Amino acid sequence: MAVNTIDSKLVAKMFMAGACNLEKNKEYINELNVFPVPDGDTGTNMTMTIMSAYKELNALDNPDMRAVCKAISSGSLRGARGNSGVILSQLIRGFTKIASEYDELDIDILTNAFKNSVQTAYKAVMKPKEGTILTVASGVYDKAEELRTAGEKDLDTYLKKVLDYADEVLLKTPDLLPVLKQAGVVDSGGQGLMEVLHGAYDIFSGKDVDITLNATKDKREKNITPSEKIALNEIKYSYKTEFTVILKQAMNVKIDKDYANFLDSIGDNVSFNVTAETAKVYVHTNDPGLVIQKALKFGMLSEISIENLKLDEKHQEAKAEEKTEEAPAPVKEAHAELKEYGFIAVSVGEGMSEIFKSVGTDYIIEGGQTMNPSTEDMLNAIDKVNAKHIFILPNNKNIIMAANQARDLTEDKDIIVIPTKTVPQGIGAMINFMAEASAEDNTESMTEGASNVKTGQVTYAVRDTEIDNKVIKKDDYMGIGDSGILSVGADRDQVTKDMIKEMVDEDSSVITVYVGSDVDSEAAEKLKADLEEAYEDVEVEIQNGGQPIYYYIVSVE
């Protein structure tokens, strides 16, 4: 018997199946990224976005349509990471706004929901581009409207034809974006959307699909060992550090023995739980930042948890019992006084974060290139800064939309997003802040300060490709400028110098080089000497950035 409506129970199953299908194919989607850089990938960002909604939906017990739609929309909006994740969350938001008004969905309602989905997503993007996930989503609605107008009554036929047409649109994306055509790939965001839709249709069509995810091991199972539940000052390693590495499947990357030996050298209680796609890492250490940075070469990180064992509640209670008589009455920590302006910056690397703090940043969100923070991360940061006007510096073009989404979800504070695309732009914006000026004047001044900074970043290629008419081989070094790749080669420092040559002009007065965690001081000083010799009239500064993956981040002003 034909099914011509979809109730809340089926909607929930279809969404969860779509989420699982996206998660299963995320590495394939990551491989479609045009730029072969080892940082935030489309498949990972979209998966983490939709899994936030999956978890919220999965926590509900027999929800009605309104509750299903609310969980899906809220979870994806708050969990959105990267531009692709934000756009996906907006597509979901637009769809659920219509669907939530009905107990069951038929062809008319679905078509209206597809229409609102596309309109909502396009509104969220400042400069929409064709050949992207937006084009594929538009294809979904266009075919749905065509079928409704033609009087299609069978829901299975309707959904199948919509998906077939959307697949055709996806295959045409390289004809709409030259960069896709040159790289020989379809749009990765569009592919991610189709994985969701195909997974959802599998459930509708009656396929036997597993819609449960591998449960993440409860962190509470990893309690502190009895030998560690002793006096506070006897703990050797302070930080319990654990995270999941989403391994680079395209390169068959595995956690190697060198990394295991490294962990043993700076900590104890080391353990791994390795599957074909992920590796769960657990260690007690005094340097969790270094543990995380070294792990980035194996893939993307998620579910990062760092706990200070010396502040563990059980240890605190033990110490309190020992010093009950001498301990003073507890003093409630005073709430930070409301101030006029506050600042949030996205940064990665100890040196970079210290620079932001030195110029007045109130809160640092760890992330940036190597792990795009979510809208939820932004909202949590906003909650911690007690100011009337809060400036957010995303410092990455793939984080700006998440910052804007956090701004739109905040009602009790004035949130101003300065659209900084790089860390040097963020520093330039902070330097141009004027305490006595209005929020409007500062927005203009900070935006202008950011726009005056040219940025170049040196990293390595994770695969062979051709971009900007440059042939790139796996493991080549790349110098990436604001508008594309400026230099490529096998010699890291030569690539850096070639990149800077493309950035410097007769108006340049300062070159600042932020040195990454994988560059030694001798190499950095050699680079500085070479630059001073090549540009006698330009001041050259070397700063410790400490950023992973990017050997050098360079600003020219």
Image: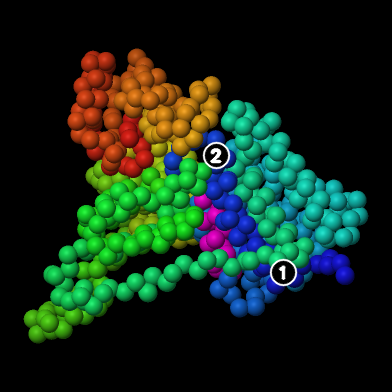
Magenta-drawn segment = 44-57
Say which of 413 and 477 sits in front. Answer: 477
Residue drawn at 14 percent across, 70 percent down? 234
Task: Report x, y in % for residue 314.
Answer: 24, 78
Q: Nearer the viewer, residue 236 or 50?
A: 236
Locate residue 407 relative to residue 137 in the image: left or right.
left
Q: Main secondary structure of the magenta part?
A: helix
Above/below status of 382 relative to 138 = below
> From the viewer's perspective, is 476 left or right of 181?
left
Residue 266 image offset from top left, x and y in percent: 22, 55
Question: Image quarter for residue 437?
Answer: top left
Question: Could you tell me which residue is drawn at 78 percent across and 48 percent down?
Answer: 164
Q: Look at the picture and state if 270 lies above or below 341.
A: below
Residue that badge 2 annotates: 33
Element type at marker 1? helix
Give the residue type at disc 2.
Asn
Measured in 3D between alpha carbons, the distance from the residue under mark 2 to the one under mark 1, in whole angstroms, is 33 Å
The percent coordinates of residue 417 (x first, y second) are 45, 46
Residue 267 in percent (x, y) is at 23, 59
Question: In this figure, which residue is indicated by the disc labeled 1?
Answer: 10
Q: Residues within 10 Å of mark 1 (few under 14, many from 20)?
A: some
**Residues packed near mark 2 inside 10 Å, few (<14), some (14 to 19) or many (20 plus):** many
**Within the magenta stretch, is there residue 313?**
no
